[in-house]
Image (cartoon, rainbow, N blue to C red):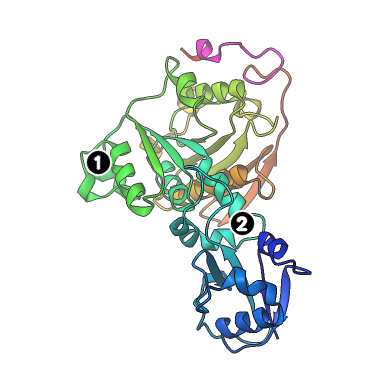
């Protein structure tokens, strides 16, 4: 026997007893037709008078779209999906987007609603270098509807060892424009907004407040503390990543009342102790690992999936291929998110 899973709206319309019906058939078409004969109320909803399946239904099998002539084995499940969303307006998923994101939509906990949340989301990526490169590619591929890119720099050949969103064809081009070109080619259904300047105390708040989540791909402490303070004040989740030589760190700050960056690192180290990739180097694959973990945490936060890294610092050692984590809590005396936090955090970092 095989099973067909019907959407709830069709179950109600056809007055079925449940959303999972068992039937027989060597192909998807035979299985559906047999169930329609057994449950005549399905006929008018699934098929035209000429027997053709109505176009607003999609059929999936093992996470992929299938045609009516797709072959089935005993125990297989086929899901019938509506190819248009129940909403209206520019935020609705088009038929083409449903087909593009079908591997997401069939995931437990994501579905059409989760993919809709990604489409409606606005994510700001600060820095389109080592960390921002993989993060922006995978967030674009995932269908985050609006992605803002902040970077003042241009693409240089020394970047290409690790900044995979850029290439030789974009040498000398502003990084935000180079990344935008690749992201739009990867997913034409999203909007990529470029901000070709450095984020500072004068523009941080006005820039960050128009986004839902911020991904930190910066490479200096001053910007990290500034961005964290503004995110803490505005209540914006901040996905943090940092790399040095063969080691990386990832965490999520300001999520649902959780701790912030300054709760974990109250003060930055003195210059002579501050690690720098420019001076110390970084293995090219490391930003890929950390940037993808950041993208994963961003998607989880936007969709509402799983357990986030809020209150946990994930550490990665590439040489040992080892992960461990450090737990931390929100501090009442934190100058960014505590009881005495500044009303205008930009003044602290101007």
In the image: residue 196, left or right of residue 225: left
Picture layout, residue 304 above or below residue 25: above
Q: Disc 1 designates what residue?
A: 156
Picture layout, residue 199 above or below residue 67: above
Which residue is depicted at the point 66% across and 63% down?
A: 10
Depth order, front residue of 326/296: 296
Which residue is depicted at the point 32% across and 52% down?
A: 185
Q: In the displayed image of the protein, which residue is found farthest to the right?
A: 17
Q: Are marks 2 and 1 in contact (CB under 8 Å)?
A: no
| x then y, percent, for residue 158 | 27, 44
Secondary structure at numbered mark 1: loop
In the image: residue 73, left or right of residue 51: right
Depth order, front residue of 236/175: 236
Which residue is depicted at the point 61% across and 79% down?
A: 32
Quick check: is 261 in the magenta stretch?
Answer: no
Q: In the displayed image of the protein, which residue is found farthest to the front?
A: 49
Picture layout, residue 317 above or below residue 102: above
**Closer to viewer: mark 2 or mark 1:** 2
- Magenta-highlighted residues: 336-348
């Amino acid at each position: 026997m095989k099973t067909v899973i019907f959407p709830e709206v069709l179950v109600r319309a056809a007055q079925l007893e449940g959303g999972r019906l068992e039937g027989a058939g060597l192909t998807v078409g035979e299985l559906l037709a047999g169930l329609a004969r057994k449950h005549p109320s399905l006929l008018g909803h699934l098929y035209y008078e000429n027997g053709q399946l109505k176009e607003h239904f999609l059929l999936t099998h093992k996470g992929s779209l299938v045609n009516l002539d797709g072959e089935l084995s005993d125990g297989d499940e086929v899901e019938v999906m509506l190819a248009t969303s129940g909403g209206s307006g520019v935020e609705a998923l088009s038929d083409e987007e449903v087909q593009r994101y079908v591997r997401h939509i069939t995931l437990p906990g994501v579905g059409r609603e989760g993919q809709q949340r990604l489409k409606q989301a606005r994510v700001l990526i600060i820095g389109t270098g080592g960390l921002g490169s993989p993060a922006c590619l995978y967030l674009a591929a995932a269908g985050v509807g609006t992605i803002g890119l902040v970077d003042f720099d241009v693409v240089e050949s020394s970047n290409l060892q690790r900044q995979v969103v850029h290439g030789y064809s974009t040498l000398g081009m502003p990084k935000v424009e180079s990344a935008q070109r690749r992201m739009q080619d990867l997913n034409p259904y999203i909007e990529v907004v470029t901000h070709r300047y450095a984020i500072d105390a004068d523009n941080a708040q006005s820039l960050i407040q128009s986004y839902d989540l911020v991904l930190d791909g910066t490479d200096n402490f001053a910007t990290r503390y500034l961005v964290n303070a503004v995110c803490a004040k505005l209540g914006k989740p901040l996905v943090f990543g940092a790399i040095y030589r063969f080691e990386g760190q990832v965490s999520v700050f300001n999520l649902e009342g959780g701790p912030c960056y300054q709760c974990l690192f109250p003060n930055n180290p003195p210059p002579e102790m501050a690690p720098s990739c420019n001076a110390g180097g970084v293995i090219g694959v490391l930003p890929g690992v950390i940037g993808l973990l950041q993208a994963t945490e961003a998607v989880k936060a936007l969709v509402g999936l799983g357990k986030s890294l809020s209150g946990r610092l994930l550490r990665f050692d590439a040489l040992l291929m080892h992960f461990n984590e450090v737990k931390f809590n929100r501090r009442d005396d934190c100058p960014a998110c505590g009881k005495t936090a500044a009303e205008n955090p930009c003044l602290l970092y101007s």
